Protein backbone atom coordinates (compact mmCIF):
# COMPACT_ATOMS: atom_id res chain seq x y z
CA UNK A 1 0.00 0.00 0.00
CA UNK A 2 1.46 3.37 -1.05
CA UNK A 3 0.58 6.48 0.91
CA UNK A 4 1.33 10.04 -0.18
CA UNK A 5 1.73 12.13 2.98
CA UNK A 6 1.81 15.88 3.55
CA UNK A 7 3.22 17.63 6.63
CA UNK A 8 2.90 21.40 7.19
CA UNK A 9 2.44 21.77 10.95
CA UNK A 10 5.14 24.36 11.58
CA UNK A 11 7.97 25.80 9.46
CA UNK A 12 8.70 22.72 7.34
CA UNK A 13 6.78 21.87 4.17
CA UNK A 14 7.18 18.16 3.55
CA UNK A 15 5.76 15.43 1.34
CA UNK A 16 6.65 11.75 1.01
CA UNK A 17 5.51 8.53 -0.62
CA UNK A 18 5.91 5.49 1.65
CA UNK A 19 5.09 1.87 0.91
CA UNK A 20 3.58 -0.36 3.61
CA UNK A 21 4.53 2.11 6.34
CA UNK A 22 8.20 1.20 6.13
CA UNK A 23 9.77 1.83 2.74
CA UNK A 24 10.42 5.45 1.79
CA UNK A 25 9.94 5.71 -1.97
CA UNK A 26 10.47 9.46 -2.12
CA UNK A 27 10.63 12.29 0.36
CA UNK A 28 11.06 16.06 -0.03
CA UNK A 29 11.22 18.98 2.35
CA UNK A 30 11.48 22.78 2.30
CA UNK A 31 12.05 24.79 5.46
CA UNK A 32 11.67 28.44 6.41
CA UNK A 33 13.81 28.07 9.56
CA UNK A 34 16.45 30.51 8.29
CA UNK A 35 13.81 33.23 7.78
CA UNK A 36 12.80 33.05 11.45
CA UNK A 37 16.33 33.31 12.84
CA UNK A 38 16.53 37.08 12.94
CA UNK A 39 13.36 37.20 15.09
CA UNK A 40 14.66 34.59 17.56
CA UNK A 41 11.67 32.30 16.97
CA UNK A 42 9.06 31.18 14.48
CA UNK A 43 6.80 33.92 13.11
CA UNK A 44 3.51 32.10 12.32
CA UNK A 45 2.50 34.48 9.51
CA UNK A 46 5.87 34.06 7.77
CA UNK A 47 5.72 30.26 8.25
CA UNK A 48 2.22 30.09 6.71
CA UNK A 49 3.19 32.20 3.70
CA UNK A 50 6.23 29.99 3.10
CA UNK A 51 4.01 26.90 3.34
CA UNK A 52 1.82 28.36 0.59
CA UNK A 53 4.87 29.08 -1.57
CA UNK A 54 6.39 25.60 -1.12
CA UNK A 55 3.51 23.13 -0.91
CA UNK A 56 2.98 22.47 -4.63
CA UNK A 57 6.70 22.33 -5.58
CA UNK A 58 7.36 19.89 -2.71
CA UNK A 59 4.49 17.58 -3.74
CA UNK A 60 5.67 17.86 -7.34
CA UNK A 61 9.18 16.87 -6.25
CA UNK A 62 8.09 13.62 -4.53
CA UNK A 63 5.96 12.67 -7.52
CA UNK A 64 8.77 13.50 -9.99
CA UNK A 65 11.12 11.29 -7.98
CA UNK A 66 8.68 8.42 -8.25
CA UNK A 67 6.50 8.62 -11.34
CA UNK A 68 7.01 6.46 -14.39
CA UNK A 69 8.52 8.14 -17.43
CA UNK A 70 5.91 9.82 -19.57
CA UNK A 71 3.17 9.65 -16.90
CA UNK A 72 1.54 12.87 -15.72
CA UNK A 73 1.45 13.87 -12.05
CA UNK A 74 -2.28 13.22 -11.78
CA UNK A 75 -1.91 9.86 -13.55
CA UNK A 76 0.79 8.95 -11.05
CA UNK A 77 -1.54 9.69 -8.12
CA UNK A 78 -4.52 7.97 -9.74
CA UNK A 79 -2.61 4.83 -10.77
CA UNK A 80 -0.02 4.43 -8.03
CA UNK A 81 -1.15 6.05 -4.79
CA UNK A 82 -3.59 4.19 -2.52
CA UNK A 83 -4.28 6.91 0.05
CA UNK A 84 -3.40 10.48 1.02
CA UNK A 85 -2.36 11.33 4.59
CA UNK A 86 -2.05 14.76 6.14
CA UNK A 87 -1.06 16.27 9.49
CA UNK A 88 -4.16 17.91 10.97
CA UNK A 89 -2.52 19.00 14.26
CA UNK A 90 -1.13 20.00 16.64
CA UNK A 91 0.64 22.96 15.09
CA UNK A 92 0.28 26.50 13.80
CA UNK A 93 -3.17 27.11 12.33
CA UNK A 94 -1.97 29.00 9.25
CA UNK A 95 0.64 26.37 8.43
CA UNK A 96 -1.67 23.40 9.09
CA UNK A 97 -4.43 24.83 6.87
CA UNK A 98 -2.13 24.86 3.84
CA UNK A 99 -1.43 21.12 4.06
CA UNK A 100 -4.94 20.14 5.12
CA UNK A 101 -6.70 22.05 2.32
CA UNK A 102 -4.21 20.80 -0.28
CA UNK A 103 -4.71 17.19 0.83
CA UNK A 104 -8.49 17.59 0.86
CA UNK A 105 -8.42 18.97 -2.66
CA UNK A 106 -6.25 16.08 -3.85
CA UNK A 107 -8.58 13.54 -2.23
CA UNK A 108 -11.64 15.31 -3.64
CA UNK A 109 -10.26 15.32 -7.18
CA UNK A 110 -8.83 11.79 -7.19
CA UNK A 111 -11.34 10.04 -4.93
CA UNK A 112 -8.50 8.57 -2.86
CA UNK A 113 -9.05 7.88 0.86
CA UNK A 114 -7.84 10.73 3.10
CA UNK A 115 -6.20 9.92 6.46
CA UNK A 116 -5.82 12.63 9.15
CA UNK A 117 -2.65 12.31 11.25
CA UNK A 118 -1.62 13.61 14.68
CA UNK A 119 1.89 15.05 14.21
CA UNK A 120 3.18 14.18 17.68
CA UNK A 121 1.99 10.58 17.63
CA UNK A 122 3.38 10.23 14.12
CA UNK A 123 6.92 11.16 15.26
CA UNK A 124 7.37 7.72 16.89
CA UNK A 125 6.60 5.92 13.62
CA UNK A 126 9.94 7.19 12.26
CA UNK A 127 11.23 4.09 14.04
CA UNK A 128 9.29 1.86 11.64
CA UNK A 129 10.87 3.39 8.53
CA UNK A 130 13.79 2.15 6.55
CA UNK A 131 16.06 4.99 5.50
CA UNK A 132 16.09 6.19 1.91
CA UNK A 133 19.40 4.44 1.27
CA UNK A 134 17.62 1.16 1.93
CA UNK A 135 19.49 0.39 5.14
CA UNK A 136 17.49 -0.05 8.30
CA UNK A 137 16.82 3.10 10.30
CA UNK A 138 16.59 0.96 13.38
CA UNK A 139 19.51 1.20 15.71
CA UNK A 140 19.12 -1.34 18.48
CA UNK A 141 21.47 -0.80 21.39
CA UNK A 142 24.22 -2.86 19.87
CA UNK A 143 26.29 -2.54 22.99
CA UNK A 144 27.52 -5.39 25.10
CA UNK A 145 24.71 -7.14 26.89
CA UNK A 146 21.98 -5.83 24.64
CA UNK A 147 19.51 -8.34 23.36
CA UNK A 148 19.78 -9.35 19.73
CA UNK A 149 16.25 -8.93 18.39
CA UNK A 150 17.07 -8.92 14.67
CA UNK A 151 16.22 -5.25 14.49
CA UNK A 152 12.54 -5.98 15.06
CA UNK A 153 10.50 -3.76 17.34
CA UNK A 154 8.95 -6.04 19.92
CA UNK A 155 5.97 -5.13 22.09
CA UNK A 156 5.12 -3.85 24.58
CA UNK A 157 7.30 -0.87 23.73
CA UNK A 158 7.82 2.43 25.51
CA UNK A 159 8.00 5.41 23.19
CA UNK A 160 9.52 8.78 24.14
CA UNK A 161 8.66 11.64 21.79
CA UNK A 162 10.96 14.58 22.44
CA UNK A 163 10.60 17.54 20.10
CA UNK A 164 10.57 21.32 20.20
CA UNK A 165 6.92 21.33 21.23
CA UNK A 166 6.41 17.99 22.99
CA UNK A 167 7.84 15.64 25.58
CA UNK A 168 5.53 12.64 25.82
CA UNK A 169 5.77 9.04 26.96
CA UNK A 170 3.58 6.35 25.44
CA UNK A 171 3.00 2.65 25.93
CA UNK A 172 2.71 0.77 22.63
CA UNK A 173 1.07 -2.62 23.02
CA UNK A 174 1.30 -3.14 19.27
CA UNK A 175 2.10 -0.98 16.25
CA UNK A 176 -1.44 0.42 16.43
CA UNK A 177 -2.27 0.45 20.16
CA UNK A 178 -1.04 3.56 21.97
CA UNK A 179 -1.62 4.71 25.54
CA UNK A 180 -0.35 8.07 26.76
CA UNK A 181 1.58 7.66 30.04
CA UNK A 182 2.81 11.16 30.79
CA UNK A 183 4.20 14.35 29.36
CA UNK A 184 5.55 17.77 30.11
CA UNK A 185 3.51 19.99 32.39
CA UNK A 186 5.18 23.13 30.98
CA UNK A 187 8.12 23.49 28.53
CA UNK A 188 9.08 20.67 26.18
CA UNK A 189 12.63 19.27 26.29
CA UNK A 190 13.50 20.85 22.91
CA UNK A 191 12.05 24.16 24.09
CA UNK A 192 14.26 23.94 27.21
CA UNK A 193 17.32 23.33 25.01
CA UNK A 194 16.34 26.26 22.76
CA UNK A 195 15.57 28.72 25.57
CA UNK A 196 18.66 27.90 27.63
CA UNK A 197 20.82 28.11 24.48
CA UNK A 198 19.62 31.68 24.00
CA UNK A 199 20.32 32.51 27.66
CA UNK A 200 23.88 31.25 27.18
CA UNK A 201 24.32 33.57 24.21
CA UNK A 202 23.73 31.22 21.28
CA UNK A 203 21.65 33.20 18.84
CA UNK A 204 20.94 30.17 16.67
CA UNK A 205 21.19 26.42 16.91
CA UNK A 206 19.24 25.56 20.11
CA UNK A 207 19.83 21.93 21.08
CA UNK A 208 22.68 21.32 18.60
CA UNK A 209 24.44 24.49 19.90
CA UNK A 210 24.23 23.19 23.49
CA UNK A 211 25.41 19.75 22.38
CA UNK A 212 28.43 21.21 20.57
CA UNK A 213 29.38 23.56 23.42
CA UNK A 214 29.04 20.72 25.96
CA UNK A 215 31.65 18.72 24.05
CA UNK A 216 34.22 21.40 25.01
CA UNK A 217 33.60 20.99 28.76
CA UNK A 218 36.87 20.22 30.57
CA UNK A 219 35.27 18.42 33.54
CA UNK A 220 35.58 21.24 36.11
CA UNK A 221 32.03 21.62 37.40
CA UNK A 222 31.05 25.21 38.23
CA UNK A 223 27.27 24.97 38.22
CA UNK A 224 24.56 22.57 39.43
CA UNK A 225 21.12 22.70 37.89
CA UNK A 226 17.97 20.95 39.15
CA UNK A 227 16.62 17.65 37.75
CA UNK A 228 12.93 18.63 37.81
CA UNK A 229 10.39 15.94 38.85
CA UNK A 230 13.13 13.29 38.82
CA UNK A 231 11.85 11.60 41.95
CA UNK A 232 8.11 12.18 41.80
CA UNK A 233 5.73 9.27 41.24
CA UNK A 234 4.39 10.34 37.87
CA UNK A 235 5.75 9.94 34.35
CA UNK A 236 5.46 13.70 33.83
CA UNK A 237 8.21 16.17 33.03
CA UNK A 238 8.78 19.83 33.84
CA UNK A 239 11.56 21.90 32.28
CA UNK A 240 10.52 25.52 32.75
CA UNK A 241 12.42 25.82 36.07
CA UNK A 242 15.71 25.29 34.25
CA UNK A 243 15.47 28.72 32.65
CA UNK A 244 15.06 30.43 36.02
CA UNK A 245 17.94 28.43 37.50
CA UNK A 246 20.21 29.33 34.60
CA UNK A 247 19.36 33.03 34.78
CA UNK A 248 20.26 32.97 38.50
CA UNK A 249 23.53 31.04 38.07
CA UNK A 250 24.66 32.74 34.85
CA UNK A 251 24.58 36.14 36.64
CA UNK A 252 27.44 34.91 38.83
CA UNK A 253 29.72 34.94 35.77
CA UNK A 254 29.58 38.49 34.35
CA UNK A 255 32.40 37.82 31.84
CA UNK A 256 31.90 34.18 30.90
CA UNK A 257 34.77 32.43 29.11
CA UNK A 258 34.21 29.73 26.49
CA UNK A 259 34.89 27.21 29.27
CA UNK A 260 32.19 28.79 31.47
CA UNK A 261 29.72 28.48 28.60
CA UNK A 262 30.82 24.89 27.99
CA UNK A 263 30.32 24.01 31.67
CA UNK A 264 26.80 25.48 31.63
CA UNK A 265 25.93 23.78 28.33
CA UNK A 266 27.17 20.46 29.69
CA UNK A 267 25.09 20.81 32.86
CA UNK A 268 21.95 21.82 30.92
CA UNK A 269 22.33 18.78 28.69
CA UNK A 270 22.94 16.51 31.72
CA UNK A 271 19.92 17.87 33.55
CA UNK A 272 17.52 17.41 30.62
CA UNK A 273 18.86 14.01 29.55
CA UNK A 274 19.03 12.65 33.13
CA UNK A 275 15.31 13.26 33.58
CA UNK A 276 14.34 11.94 30.13
CA UNK A 277 16.27 8.71 30.68
CA UNK A 278 15.12 8.16 34.28
CA UNK A 279 11.43 8.59 33.52
CA UNK A 280 11.61 6.41 30.41
CA UNK A 281 13.44 3.65 32.28
CA UNK A 282 10.78 3.81 35.00
CA UNK A 283 8.06 3.35 32.36
CA UNK A 284 10.00 0.44 30.81
CA UNK A 285 10.17 -1.31 34.20
CA UNK A 286 6.51 -0.64 34.99
CA UNK A 287 5.35 -2.18 31.71
CA UNK A 288 8.08 -4.81 31.19
CA UNK A 289 8.75 -3.24 27.81
CA UNK A 290 10.74 -5.09 25.17
CA UNK A 291 11.66 -2.04 23.09
CA UNK A 292 12.37 1.64 23.70
CA UNK A 293 11.58 3.98 20.81
CA UNK A 294 13.04 7.48 20.72
CA UNK A 295 11.82 10.12 18.29
CA UNK A 296 11.54 13.87 17.71
CA UNK A 297 14.29 16.43 17.19
CA UNK A 298 15.84 15.96 20.65
CA UNK A 299 16.36 12.23 19.92
CA UNK A 300 19.17 13.49 17.66
CA UNK A 301 21.12 14.35 20.84
CA UNK A 302 24.20 12.16 21.02
CA UNK A 303 24.51 12.34 24.81
CA UNK A 304 20.88 11.25 25.19
CA UNK A 305 21.43 8.23 22.94
CA UNK A 306 24.58 7.27 24.84
CA UNK A 307 22.89 7.63 28.22
CA UNK A 308 20.01 5.42 27.11
CA UNK A 309 22.40 2.68 26.09
CA UNK A 310 24.22 2.94 29.43
CA UNK A 311 20.97 2.97 31.41
CA UNK A 312 19.72 -0.17 29.64
CA UNK A 313 22.89 -2.00 30.62
CA UNK A 314 22.99 -0.62 34.14
CA UNK A 315 19.36 -1.45 34.90
CA UNK A 316 19.78 -4.84 33.16
CA UNK A 317 16.73 -4.16 31.00
CA UNK A 318 15.82 -6.65 28.33
CA UNK A 319 14.55 -3.81 26.13
CA UNK A 320 16.28 -2.91 22.87
CA UNK A 321 16.76 0.75 21.94
CA UNK A 322 15.53 2.14 18.61
CA UNK A 323 16.49 5.59 17.36
CA UNK A 324 15.75 6.89 13.86
CA UNK A 325 18.57 8.45 11.84
CA UNK A 326 18.81 12.18 12.48
CA UNK A 327 17.01 13.21 9.27
CA UNK A 328 14.00 11.14 10.36
CA UNK A 329 14.05 12.48 13.96
CA UNK A 330 13.27 16.02 12.82
CA UNK A 331 10.07 16.93 10.98
CA UNK A 332 9.36 15.15 7.69
CA UNK A 333 6.39 13.57 5.91
CA UNK A 334 7.69 9.99 5.78
CA UNK A 335 6.67 9.30 9.38
CA UNK A 336 3.28 10.87 8.71
CA UNK A 337 2.77 8.19 6.04
CA UNK A 338 4.08 5.47 8.37
CA UNK A 339 1.60 6.48 11.09
CA UNK A 340 -1.23 6.55 8.55
CA UNK A 341 -0.35 3.02 7.46
CA UNK A 342 -0.11 1.51 10.96
CA UNK A 343 -2.76 3.46 12.79
CA UNK A 344 -4.62 5.85 10.51
CA UNK A 345 -8.27 5.69 9.58
CA UNK A 346 -9.67 7.31 6.45
CA UNK A 347 -12.16 10.10 7.10
CA UNK A 348 -14.49 11.79 4.62
CA UNK A 349 -12.86 15.02 3.41
CA UNK A 350 -15.86 17.07 4.61
CA UNK A 351 -15.01 16.08 8.18
CA UNK A 352 -11.29 16.84 8.14
CA UNK A 353 -10.11 20.13 9.56
CA UNK A 354 -6.92 21.64 10.99
CA UNK A 355 -6.82 21.39 14.82
CA UNK A 356 -3.96 23.50 16.25
CA UNK A 357 -4.32 22.08 19.78
CA UNK A 358 -5.02 18.45 18.82
CA UNK A 359 -4.52 16.31 21.94
CA UNK A 360 -1.79 13.65 22.16
CA UNK A 361 -3.48 11.74 24.97
CA UNK A 362 -4.45 8.84 22.72
O1 LIG B 1 10.92 17.36 16.07
P1 LIG B 1 11.46 18.69 15.75
O2 LIG B 1 12.28 18.84 14.49
O3 LIG B 1 10.36 19.76 15.63
C1 LIG B 1 9.21 19.79 16.43
O4 LIG B 1 8.22 19.12 16.04
O5 LIG B 1 9.27 20.49 17.45
O6 LIG B 1 12.33 19.13 17.02
C2 LIG B 1 13.05 20.34 17.06
C3 LIG B 1 13.73 20.43 18.42
C4 LIG B 1 14.36 21.79 18.69
O7 LIG B 1 13.98 22.21 19.97
C5 LIG B 1 15.87 21.52 18.63
O8 LIG B 1 16.64 22.36 19.45
C6 LIG B 1 15.91 20.07 19.13
O9 LIG B 1 14.79 19.46 18.51
N1 LIG B 1 17.14 19.40 18.72
C7 LIG B 1 18.09 18.98 19.60
C8 LIG B 1 19.15 18.43 18.83
N2 LIG B 1 18.79 18.53 17.51
C9 LIG B 1 17.56 19.11 17.47
N3 LIG B 1 18.12 19.04 20.95
C10 LIG B 1 19.21 18.53 21.55
N4 LIG B 1 20.28 18.01 20.88
C11 LIG B 1 20.28 17.94 19.54
N5 LIG B 1 21.33 17.42 18.89
ZN1 LIG C 1 7.77 17.48 15.09
Image (tube, rainbow, N blue to C red):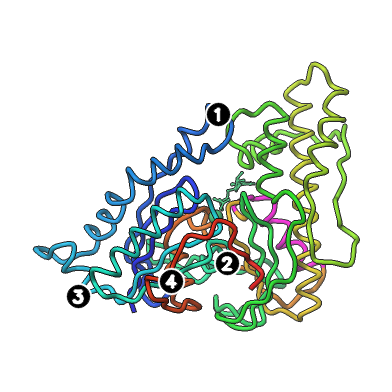
Q: Secondary structure at mark 4?
A: helix
Q: Give me the residue at 48% from left, 60% from top.
A: 354
Q: Is residue 121 magenta?
A: no
> Is residue 22 shown above or below 249?
below
* Distance from Cα at disc 2 to Cα at disc 3: 29 Å
Q: Which circle marks residue 79 in the picture?
A: 3
- Nearest the viewer among 353 and 133 is 353
Q: Secondary structure at mark 1?
A: loop
* Distance from Cα at disc 1 to Cα at disc 4: 36 Å
* Distance from Cα at disc 2 to Cα at disc 4: 20 Å
Q: Which residues are magenta?
A: 300-314
* Mark 1 C-beta closer than 8 Å to ligand 1: no
Task: For ligand 2, give the image quadrant.
Answer: bottom right
* Distance from Cα at disc 2 to Cα at disc 1: 29 Å
Residue annotated with mark 4 = 351
Residue annotated with mark 1 = 39
Q: Which circle marks residue 245 in the picture?
A: none
Q: Earlier in the sequence, mark 4 or mark 3?
A: 3
Q: Secondary structure at mark 2?
A: helix
| Label 1, residues with CA under 10 Å away: few <14, some 14-19, many ≥20 | few
Residue annotated with mark 2 = 121
- Nearest the viewer among 113 and 126 is 113
Q: Earlier in the sequence, mark 2 or mark 3?
A: 3
Residues under numbered marks 2 and 4 in contact, where contact means CB atoms less than 8 Å apart: no
Left of 75 or right of it: where is 142? right
Q: Looking at the rendering, in which quadrant would you find the C terminus?
A: bottom right
Q: Looking at the rendering, in which quadrant would you find the N terminus?
A: bottom left
**Residue furthest front as drawn:** 350
**Residue 103 in which image quadrant:** bottom left
Q: Earlier in the sequence, mark 1 or mark 4?
A: 1
Amino acid sequence: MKILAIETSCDETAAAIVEDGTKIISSALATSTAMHRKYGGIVPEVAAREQLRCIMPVIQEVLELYKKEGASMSQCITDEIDAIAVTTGPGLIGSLLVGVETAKTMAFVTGKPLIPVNHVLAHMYANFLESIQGSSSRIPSATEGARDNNNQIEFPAISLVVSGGHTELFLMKSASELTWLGGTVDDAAGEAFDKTARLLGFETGGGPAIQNAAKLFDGKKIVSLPRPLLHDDTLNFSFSGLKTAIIREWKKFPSPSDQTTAAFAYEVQESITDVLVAKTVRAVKQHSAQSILLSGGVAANIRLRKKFKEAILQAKLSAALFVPPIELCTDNAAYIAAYAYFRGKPVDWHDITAIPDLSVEA
